[in-house]
Image (tube, rainbow, N blue to C red):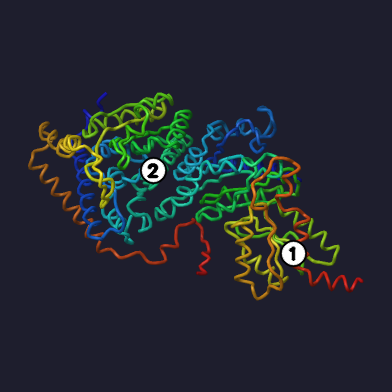
Amino acid sequence: MELSRNLPRETLLEMQRRMLRIRLFDERASKMVKRGYIPGTVHTSIGQEAQVVGACMALNAGDHMTGNHRSHGHPIGMGSPLGPLMAELVGKATGVCGGKGGSLHLADYAVGSLGESGITGSSIPIAVGAGLSAQVLGEDRVALTFFGDGTANQGVLYESMNLASAYKLPAIFLCENNFYALSTPSHTVTGGRIVDRAAGFGMPGVRVEDGQDVLAVYDAVAEAADRARRGEGPSLVEVMTYRFREHSEGLRINVDYRDAEEKAFWTSRDPIILFREALVARDIASTEEMDALEAGIEEEVEACATFALESPDPDLSVAFEHLYTDPYELEAVL
Amino acid sequence: MSIMTYIGAIGAAQQEAMSADERVIIIGEDVEANVYGTTGGGKQRAEQGDFVQQFGQNRIRNTPISEEAIVGTAIGAAMTGLRPIVDLSYSSFLYMAMDQFVNQAAKNRYMFGGQSSIPVVFRSAMFYGLNTGAHHSDRPYPMFMNVPGLKIMAPASAADAKGLLRSAIDSDDPVLTFEAVPLWGQKEEVPEEEYRIPFGVARTRREGADVTVVGISGSVPLALQAAEDMAARGVSCEVIDPRTLVPLDSDAIVRSVEKTGRLVIAEPAHRTCGAAAEIAALVADKAHHALVAPIKRVCALDMQVPFSPALEAQIYPTRERIVAAIEAVCADQLMSENRRVG
């Protein structure tokens, strides 16, 4: 079932916009790491934009999402504004988490983003819990969790899949398979195919072989979401994709663990170029319109960087807020 | 007032909370069959007070044996509208879910700049002193005291257990309860009406002038017995139960030590980095001027728990060990007492 066939023009253009936002935001963030504006490092989603956006746009307003260490694309995919995200990466008062999360721990509850996680697998049961609350409270919403092929070998995933399946929770387990757990080819540490593990938990598993095709990802996730909304339980969606950059920005790995031919194949399948060509070929938009759309996102990203850099640092007292919801006394004897 | 057991009071608090708020749910292993006696009126489905009958399976659910997923799921549910109570049964099982407690429950609100609140209660029981062996006898609350973002309660009586649990369920932050199984059967007068006991307020179980004895969890009744023994010998003990360890009512302890000048702390957890160590450090810092004797801790030895009934009891604080500690800090007084009597 190709649910994407009937998508209105505006939705298709929004997909391209969100993919471009991720690409340009991450390219900009990478530069800002190199120049020292962003402390620490970042993990970019460059190359994986279709996998992120196709999944997020198959969700509805009010649905929930949890993510992982490759963390900027997910909230952007959910529609989070760029300024507070970039300000968070820089550590400013205007950051989406007030400067206390940083790149690895973005969350934007306004768009259903319940949090990225620096610990791989840790946010998976959080999404299952969002599914449980939907079921208990009788609310029409689903929860999706993103995890990588590396995390597919964490035990918590299987505990979570089992619990979600036993309770028939409205949850979607989305594996972003970019073939490498940092430098380790995942097939060398993974028994069998990840998608096949769904069967063991009595849930459908579907593998999107071309995760560079945003509509293919959308179709798979939209079907899983429909199923979840009908009360039929969770699904596993494995999306084959590729990260174009290093695991994290600035990381230097001497061993060339990725084959040049493989790299060339995947980089020739840039999801943003592919979708632009498809939209033009289908007469959804002209090349001029696509150029204008891209220019608009470039301006947005430029503005978000300016916003982040010009924002004030957080007040020092912010470090001592939000531990608990009620007032508490910090034992500040140093 | 009515007489209730410690375990009965926990069940009553859960029943009240489930009745009061539809967002409260109970999940855990074997909760539907009321295996541990806190989710039903008796052992029969038909009996009045059975939680499944009363609240339905939407709100009380058995879980798979998957602590990490149970705890994480409860956190996620709490972040999105429910107020779950998670029954983890044995406190030793908490370790299976350590990542969820430390990296999610304790950190999410903070890391996300206050966007989330996490109203969830994780109940567990410390089955120590009951010959259940090293895997089932842990008293691990100090480990969790070391994780800012969690609240911790360790009640030592029925009335406290009931009132504190209601406050825990009302709290918008994650709370861990550490229940003392050796006290499950102990009875106390409990108010008929619904009530809450605030966190961070210690209970003075016995007033006294010569030495402050802080008791925690199952060590509170032992401290009271030791105080009784010492009273007969002319030493007046003030017995304080902090009831919650995070937040800790350090003011009440400091005030008492300022009055007595002496401090003994008894707890069933290990000595190293335990709650007693923290309280000793606080008092050394804030009431050093008042101390006339060294602070003494009576803790579980830094040893694993042996199975044999012949071996286990010596691991934990006893009435006698607490008496010995009080004797040590009150040596001057006892000597002058002896001279006077002699």
Q: Subunit of mark 2? A: A
Mark 2 vs mark 1, CA separation in Å: 49 Å
Q: Which mark is residue B294?
A: none
Q: Position of residue A64 (x, y in %)?
A: 37, 41
Q: Quadrant of residue A145?
A: top left
Residue at the farthest front position: A255
Q: Which label belongs to residue B238?
A: 1
Rendering coords of residue A329 (x, y %): 53, 64
Side of B291 where A302 appears, left or right: left
- Neighbor class of circle 2 (other Cα within 10 Å; few <14, some 14-19, many 20+) is many
The amino acid pointed to by label 1 is Glu
- Left or right, A307 with respect to A66, comes to left
Query: Which residue is pictured at 27% across the width and 29% down the height?
Result: A208
The vertical placement of B267 against A230, above or below, is below
Which residue in the protein does label 2 denote? A120
| Residue A185 coordinates in the image, percent (x, y) | 30, 36
x and y percent of residue A119 in the render?
40, 46
